[in-house]
C-alpha cells in the first residue's frame, strides 16, 4: 500500500522525509516522490523504482525547506511512472498533495475539471483530488490575495466531501510555508506530536524515531499542523483527540544483526510468546485472563457461536483457531474470508461474536466485514497488532497481539501470536462455560509454558532446514498437506512459499489428496507433509504411503525421534512433541524458515516480495 510521510518543524524536511519513506518501504510500492517548500517555492522530485533511486535524484538535485511531504506509491490508477508518482500538484502548481486510497468518482470529477480548463499530467485519481482542492481554494480566496490556513482547511474539507472513496492525504501550499494539512477517510493516517515539530504518516514507523506521542486520526478528521502544534476538525468543527504513546521503540523496528526483517521476526517468536503467556496465563486457576478484554464475563457468557473473519495469513490463523476453540470451549466456530463475507448476505444471530483478526488493523476487506456485522447489531472483537488502528477502534473490544512491529511483508510472528491468542481465548471461554475443567486448564497452561523453549529449539535447528531448502529450491511446484489443526498450517506454509519465492504451492487437507491433487505427484513434485505424532498420525502415514508409491518426494515436519516418518520421507524436519491443539504453534515454524531459505536461495526480495503490500487498505 502507499506510504505517506509529512513534516513541519525547524529541521530540514528532506532527510526526515526520506528516512520515513525507508521505514515505509515494507508496505510495498513501485515509485516514490517528495515535495518541500522554502522561500523560493515548491521543490518536487519523484521517480519510478525504489526509494534509493529517489535518494540518488536528491543527491543530484537537492531540495530545501522545513515543510514537506513524501510518498511511496503502490499503483492503483495508472502504471508506475514518473508522471503518476506522487506528490501531485493542482492547476496553479502551488498546492501539492500525496494520497493513499482510491477516489471512486475520479473520472467524473476529472471530466468536470477538464471542462473548466484544468490540465492533467497523470492518469491518477490523486492528481484529480489535488486539482479539486485547488479549485475549491481558488473560489474561497479573493482574487490577488494569499490563501490562509482557514481557507485551505475549508477547501480540503469541501473537496474531500465531493470525492467518493477512500483517502489519507497530506497537503501543503506555497502560500503557507508553516502549514501541513492531513485528512483521512478509510485509509490510516497518524500525527506524530513533537517538540517544535509535527509529523504525519501512514503508520507510526516513520514517527517513532522522533516521538512516541501520536494521535490516530479517525475517518472524516482534518488536521492542521504547524511547528507549534495541531488543530483537529471533524465535519468542520474543532475537536480533540487523545494523544497515545507508541508501545515500541524504533530499535524494535530495525533489522539489527539479521539479513532480513522476516528472519528477525521469526526469531522474535519465542520471546513474544513468552511475554504473552506471562501476561495472560493464570496457572493456579488453570485459566487465562486478558488484560484489556473489554467484553464483560456476562457478555461472553451469552455468546453462542463465534464467527472469525480475516484475510491471508490471518485467515489461516482463524482456521486454526476454529479447531482449537471448538475443542477447548465447545462453542461452534465458523470462519469467513473477509473479502467473501463483506458481499455475502449471511444470517447473523445476535448471540454471535464476530472476531476479526488483522496484523495491520487496516485491511479493507476485514474492516468492511466487521462494519457489516456491527450494522446488524452483532458484537465484535478485534485481535490486532497495531494500537489505534481502524479495525481496533471500530470494534467493541480488542485484544492486542503485542507482536511488535512486523515489517516483513510475509507475516510470521503475527500468525504465531494470532494462533496463540485464539488458543488462549478458547481456554478462557472453555473455563468460563465449564467445558474445560480446572485440571484440564492447568494441563494446558503447563504445556503452554514449555512452548517458548520448544519454538526456540526449532529455530536453533535452522541449519537442517537450510539443508532441506538447498535440496528442493529449484523445483517449481509444491503440495502442502496436513490434517485438522495442521490443515491451516499447510495452507500457511504454501502461502509463505508462494509469496516469498513466487513458486506455485497449494495447501490441502491430507485426505483430499486422493480426490484430485494426487494426479500431480511426480518425482519433481514434492509434498510437504505436516505429520506430527497426534490423533491424525496414522491417517497421515497412509497418505505418505500413497505419495511414496507414486515416487513423489516427501518433506516431512515430524515429532522429534519419529523413525517411521524418517524412514518414509526424503527430508525430515523434527519438532518437539506437544498437545494436539497446540501443534500449529510449533509446526508452522519450520515452514516459515523453509520458505525463507528457498526465497533467499532463489535470490528473491524476501522483505519486499513483488506486487505485494504489507497492509492491503484497498479492495
Ligand atoms: C501474509 O504473509 C500476507 N502478508 C497477507 O496475506 C496478510 O496476512 C493479509 O493481507 C492480511 O493482513 P492483516 O493481517 O494485516 O489484515
Image (cartoon, grey):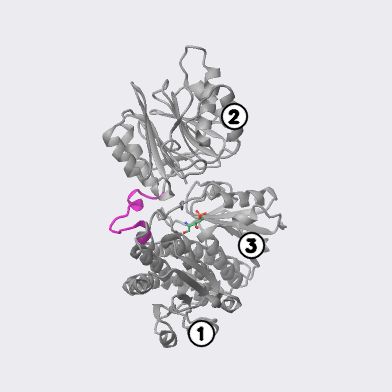
Task: Give the image quarter of residue 13.
Answer: top left
Q: Secondary structure at mark 3?
A: strand
Distance from Cα at disc 2 to Cα at disc 3: 47 Å
Query: Which numbered disc covers residue 499?
Result: none
339 versus 466 height, above or below: above
Looking at the image, which is closer to me, 348 or 244? 348
Mark 3 Cβ and ligand 1 under 8 Å apart: no
Q: Sequence order check: which comes first, mark 3 or mark 1?
A: 3
Kind of element beneath mark 2:
helix
Which residue is the site of mark 1? 541
Instruction: Report whether 40 appears left or right of 448.
Output: left
Where in the figure is residue 586, as x and y percent of width and height? 44, 71
Residue 404 versus residue 76: which sits nearer the camera? 76
Task: Give the label on residue 111, or none.
Answer: 2
Residue on which the image places disc 3:
306
Q: Position of residue 405 (x, y in %)?
A: 41, 53
Q: Nearer the viewer, mark 2 or mark 3?
A: 2
Residue 376: where, in percent of width, then height? Answer: 70, 50
Q: What is the CA distance from the residue labelled 3 to the residue labelled 1?
A: 33 Å
Name the residue located 46 percent from the left edge and 70 percent from the top edge.
Answer: 477
204 relative to 374 in the view: left or right: left
- Over which residues does the magenta segment extend? 247-263
> Contact (CB < 8 A) between labels 3 and 1?
no
Chain-order first, disc 2 or disc 3? 2
Task: Specify few, some or many for label 1: CA neighbours under 10 Å numbering under 14, 14-19, or 20 or more.
Answer: some
Question: Magenta segment, principal secondary structure?
Answer: loop
The question of residue 253 being in magenta is answered with yes
Q: Earlier in the sequence, mark 2 or mark 1?
A: 2
Amino acid at each position: 500500500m502507499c506510504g505517506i510521510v509529512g513534516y513541519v518543524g525547524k529541521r530540514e524536511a528532506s532527510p526526515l522525509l526520506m528516512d520515513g519513506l525507508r521505514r515505509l518501504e515494507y508496505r510495498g510500492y513501485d515509485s516514490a516522490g517528495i515535495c518541500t517548500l522554502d522561500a523560493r517555492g515548491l521543490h518536487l522530485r519523484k521517480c519510478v523504482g525504489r526509494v534509493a533511486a529517489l535518494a540518488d535524484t536528491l543527491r543530484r538535485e537537492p531540495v530545501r525547506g522545513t515543510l514537506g511531504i513524501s510518498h511511496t506509491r503502490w499503483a492503483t490508477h495508472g502504471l508506475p511512472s514518473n508522471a503518476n508518482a506522487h506528490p501531485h500538484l493542482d492547476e496553479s502548481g502551488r498546492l501539492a498533495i500525496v494520497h493513499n486510497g482510491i477516489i471512486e468518482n475520479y473520472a467524473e470529477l476529472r471530466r468536470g475539471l477538464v471542462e473548466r480548463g484544468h490540465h492533467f499530467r497523470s492518469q491518477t485519481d490523486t492528481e484529480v483530488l489535488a486539482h479539486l482542492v485547488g479549485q475549491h481554494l481558488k473560489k474561497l480566496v479573493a482574487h490577488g490575495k494569499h490563501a490562509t490556513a482557514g481557507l485551505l482547511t475549508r477547501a480540503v474539507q469541501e473537496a474531500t466531501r465531493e470525492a467518493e472513496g477512500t483517502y489519507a492525504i497530506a497537503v501543503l501550499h506555497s502560500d503557507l510555508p508553516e502549514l501541513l494539512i492531513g485528512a483521512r477517510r478509510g485509509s490510516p493516517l497518524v500525527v506524530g506530536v513533537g517538540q517544535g515539530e509535527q509529523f504525519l504518516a501512514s503508520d507510526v514507523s516513520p514517527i517513532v524515531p522522533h516521538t512516541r506521542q501520536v494521535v490516530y486520526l479517525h475517518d472524516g478528521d482534518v488536521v492542521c499542523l504547524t511547528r507549534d502544534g495541531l488543530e483537529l476538525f471533524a465535519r468542520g468543527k474543532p475537536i480533540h483527540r487523545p494523544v497515545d504513546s507508541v508501545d515500541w521503540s524504533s530499535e524494535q523496528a530495525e533489522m539489527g544483526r539479521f539479513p532480513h526483517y522476516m528472519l528477525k521476526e521469526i526469531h522474535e517468536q519465542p520471546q513474544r510468546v513468552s511475554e504473552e503467556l506471562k501476561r495472560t496465563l493464570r496457572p493456579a486457576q488453570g485459566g487465562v485472563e486478558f488484560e484489556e478484554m473489554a467484553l464483560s464475563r456476562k457478555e461472553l457468557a451469552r455468546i453462542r457461536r463465534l464467527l472469525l473473519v480475516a484475510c491471508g495469513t490471518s485467515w489461516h490463523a482463524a482456521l486454526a483457531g476454529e479447531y482449537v476453540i471448538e475443542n477447548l470451549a465447545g462453542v461452534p466456530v465458523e470462519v469467513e474470508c473477509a473479502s467473501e463475507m463483506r458481499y455475502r448476505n449471511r444470517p447473523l444471530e445476535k448471540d454471535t461474536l464476530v472476531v476479526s483478526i488483522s496484523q495491520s488493523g487496516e485491511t479493507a476487506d476485514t474492516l468492511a466485514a466487521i462494519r457489516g456485522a456491527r450494522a446488524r447489531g452483532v458484537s465484535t472483537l478485534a485481535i490486532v497488532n497495531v494500537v489505534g488502528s481502524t479495525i481496533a477502534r471500530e470494534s467493541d473490544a480488542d485484544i492486542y497481539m503485542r507482536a511488535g512491529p512486523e515489517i516483513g511483508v510475509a507475516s510470521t510472528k503475527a500468525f504465531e501470536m494470532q494462533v496463540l491468542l485464539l488458543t488462549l481465548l478458547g481456554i478462557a471461554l472453555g473455563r468460563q462455560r465449564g467445558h474445560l475443567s480446572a485440571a484440564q486448564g492447568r494441563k494446558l497452561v503447563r504445556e503452554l509454558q514449555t512452548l517458548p523453549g520448544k519454538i526456540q529449539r526449532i529455530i536453533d535447528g535452522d541449519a537442517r532446514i537450510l539443508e532441506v531448502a538447498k535440496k528442493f529450491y529449484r523445483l517449481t511446484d509444491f503440495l502442502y498437506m496436513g490434517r485438522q489443526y495442521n490443515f491451516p498450517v499447510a495452507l500457511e506454509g504454501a502461502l509463505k512459499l508462494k509469496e516469498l519465492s513466487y513458486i506455485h504451492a497449494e495447501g490441502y487437507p491430507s485426505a483430499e489428496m486422493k480426490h484430485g491433487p494426487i494426479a500431480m505427484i511426480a518425482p519433481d513434485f514434492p509434498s510437504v507433509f505436516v505429520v506430527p505424532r497426534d490423533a491424525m498420525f496414522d491417517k497421515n502415514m497412509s497418505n505418505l504411503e500413497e505419495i511414496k508409491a507414486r515416487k513423489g518426494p516427501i518433506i516431512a515436519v515430524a515429532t522429534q525421534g519419529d523413525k517411521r516418518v524418517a524412514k518414509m520421507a526424503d527430508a525430515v524436519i523434527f519438532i518437539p512433541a506437544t498437545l494436539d491443539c497446540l501443534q500449529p504453534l510449533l509446526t508452522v515454524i519450520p515452514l516459515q524458515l523453509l520458505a525463507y531459505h528457498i526465497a533467499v536461495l532463489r535470490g528473491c526480495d524476501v522483505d519486499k516480495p513483488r506486487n505485494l503490500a504489507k497492509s492491503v487498505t484497498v479492495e
